[in-house]
Image (cartoon, rainbow, N blue to C red):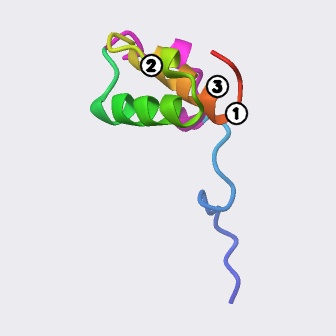
Amino acid sequence: MMSDQHNPKIDPDPSSNTEKDPDDWVTGDEPMTGAQKSYLKTLSEQVHQPDAFAEDLSKAEASKRIDALKSGQKQ
């Protein structure tokens, strides 16, 4: 039997917080998380852009740099 209920896993809400611009994050100015720090450091080394990593980045800036590195943009 098919259900007519909305399944958010199939059709995510376009206003979901996961898609919010890092500049609009309420906590974007806080220091980056440990997970961001670890991932950004590893990613910057893998793509030979160690200067993309900095110890004092905010959550928002770390997110933007991770996205840029993942998409192949130079930092």
Q: Amino acid at mark 3?
A: Ala
Q: Is disc 3 in contact with disc 1, using a CB cutoff of under 8 Å?
A: yes
For image coordinates 67% across by 77% down, the residue present is: 3
Q: Amino acid at mark 1?
A: Ser
Report helix, strand or loop for mark 3: helix
Task: Indicate which disc residue 25 carries.
Answer: none
* Disc 3: CA contacts within 10 A as few (<14), some (14-19) or many (>=20): some
Q: Amino acid at mark 2?
A: Phe
Q: Please state the extent of the stretch shown in magenta in the rendering.
A: 16-30
Q: Where is mark 3, residue-wise?
A: 68
Report helix, strand or loop for mark 2: loop
Report helix, strand or loop for mark 1: loop
Q: Vertically, is 32 above or below 4?
A: above
Q: Where is mark 1, residue-wise?
A: 71
Mark 2 or mark 3: which is in front? 2
Q: Where is mark 2, residue-wise?
A: 53
For image coordinates 49% across by 21% down, the residue present is: 50
